[in-house]
Image (spheres, rainbow, N blue to C red):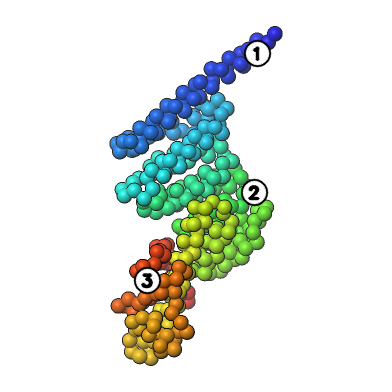
Amino acid sequence: MKRPSQTRALWTAVIAVPLLFAAIAGLQMRIDGEARSATKQKEDLLLRTPAVIKKMSFGYDSLLADIYWTRAVQYYGTRLATKGATYEQLWPLLDITTALDSKMIVAYRFGAIFLSEKGTAGAGRPDLAIELVKRGIAANPDEWHLDLDLGFLYYWRMKDYASAAKAFLAASKKPNAPQMLAMTAARVAEKGGSLDTSQMIWSEIYVSNKDPKIRERALQTLQGIKAAQDQLHLNEIADEYKNRFGRYPASTSELRSAGFLDGIPVDPLGYPYVFGPDGKAALNPDSPIVIPQDLNSLAAPKQ
């Protein structure tokens, strides 16, 4: 025969589970409605205070965190690359997700990407991305990938090279972290921002990630960095050409004919570089490579 305390516990669970799923269903309907209505997109979430939601989860924190994370991904995905799209509710969704499950590494890592990307690709809030990753580091002190992400945000988005170096150094001291991170930290501390340093960091991101989307993004950026490096080198050669002949070369073929090049230089995808009317090297119009705008401040040769 069951004891009264056991009976009460059983009935509490029976009552709690339907209430939980009723709350989830209500949340689902709310967010779906916002996705369909431009007006409702600007409204606050029905439940957006992590502490309140945690109390209402009846111990199903991880389950509810999965649901909020799924909605965050869907929310981001429906707005990605959409002209005029805004991301006001992205941070509340990520805030709640990580409050419910502080061990959900994917929410910190991908959430930081969603928040830090510029233009139509994200919220353009690297400050919130940094806050999110710092929260993840505090809850997961041995996860070196998060320190790497923090260093990346400081380096790539904030141009705060001192903070970036500290983050990379912290990552290098975590269990199973690659030793290359210590070298990266030293290089950032010594030289700050440069194309070579950016190449090191993005190479580490490419090697250390298994997610195909992140690897693809890293590879595309590495191709852009290589193209920017090539163009700087070609511009230096073009200046030498001008000093000798009094004008800039019209093509790389002229540089080769004059003995400045051994062959026709091509970008990482095999498209030959061209020269513009200003005498500066540029990507071939047919090349799909894109040089990120973030490289502009790094493209000038270091003194």
Q: Residue at x 57, y 52 (%)?
A: 210
Residue 1 showing in the rendered view: yes
Q: Position of residue 154 (x, y in %)?
A: 50, 57
- Give x and y (percent) for residue 259: 44, 89
Which callout, 3 or 1, points at the residue further toward the start of the chain? 1
- Looking at the rendered structure, the kind of residue marked 3 is Asn
Do callouts 3 and 1 mark residues in contact (Cβ within 8 Å)? no
User: Would you call the spot at circle 3 few (<14 residues within 10 Å), some (14-19), or many (20 or more)?
Assistant: some
* Residue 40 located left or right of residue 167: left
At label 2, the amino acid type is Asp
Report if residue 162 is visible in the image: no
Q: CA distance from mark 1 to mark 2?
A: 41 Å
User: In the figure, 22 relative to 165: above or below?
Assistant: above
Vertical position of residue 112 compared to residue 237: above or below: above
In the displayed structure image, the side of residue 202 where residue 249 appears, left or right = left
Give the amino acid type for the residue marked by disc 1 in the picture: Ser
Q: Quadrant of the N terminus?
A: top right
Q: Mark 1 highlights which residue?
A: 5
- Per the rendering, the mark at residue 142 is 2
Residue visible at 61% across and 59% down?
A: 169
Q: CA distance from mark 3 to mark 2?
A: 45 Å
Q: CA distance from mark 3 to mark 1?
A: 76 Å
**How many numbered marks are there?**
3
Per the image, label 3 sits on a secondary structure element best described as loop
Earlier residue among tags 1 and 2: 1
Height in image: 238 above or below 18? below
Residue 27 position, x and y percent, is: 43, 30
Dot 3 or dot 2: first in sequence order is 2
Q: Which residue is mark 3?
A: 284
